[in-house]
Image (cartoon, grey):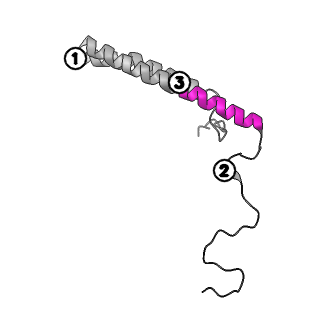
Amino acid sequence: MQETAARPKHSPGPSADSASDVVRWAAFSCVLVPVVLVVYGTSVGGAAAAALGLAAVTAACRALLRKSEREAARARAAGSAPARGRRARVAPRTQRGGRHGSGSAPVD
């Protein structure tokens, strides 16, 4: 019988270079898609327009990914500080129900 090599266990979170991998694949598609379009009969101008559109989407996604990574790094650096904002404030032992009485009090 052949022994299979043990696969390395992946961490539950995304890898550190996952955003750069996405950008690399997107750049690859910006080159590959127009080539395929030309091979299958699309005009060179149409393929160039598709390439420009894909490049614009790739650039926008790259900017959003970098912003997201910066925000995540900032959140990790801040530690487990409680969130600030209106919805983060919770009064201790408050009852938010309208008709529910306390304990065994009858409800009218």
Q: Position of residue 89 (x, y in %)?
A: 71, 54
Residue type at mark 3: give it: Arg
As for residue 43 lying within the magenta part, the answer is no
Residue 98 relative to residue 92: left or right: left
Q: Residues within 10 Å of mark 1 (few under 14, many from 20)?
A: few
Q: Which residues are magenta?
A: 64-78
Please give the name of the residue rendered at 66% of the width and 50% of the height, measured from the top-left corner: 86
Which comes sooner in the sequence, label 1 or label 3?
1
Please give the name of the residue rendered at 27% of the width and 11% of the height, measured from the top-left corner: 44
Q: CA distance from mark 2 to mark 3?
A: 31 Å
* Residue at which label 2 appears: 86
Which comes sooner in the sequence, label 1 or label 2?
1
Residue type at mark 2: give it: Arg
Q: Quadrant of residue 74?
A: top right
**Viewer-nearest residue: 80 or 82:** 82
Instruction: Please identify the quadrant where the C terminus is shown.
Output: bottom right
Q: Position of residue 43 (x, y in %)?
A: 23, 14
**Viewer-nearest residue: 102 or 72:** 102
Tell me if residue 98 comes above or below residue 7 in the rendering. Answer: below
| Magenta highlight: main SS | helix
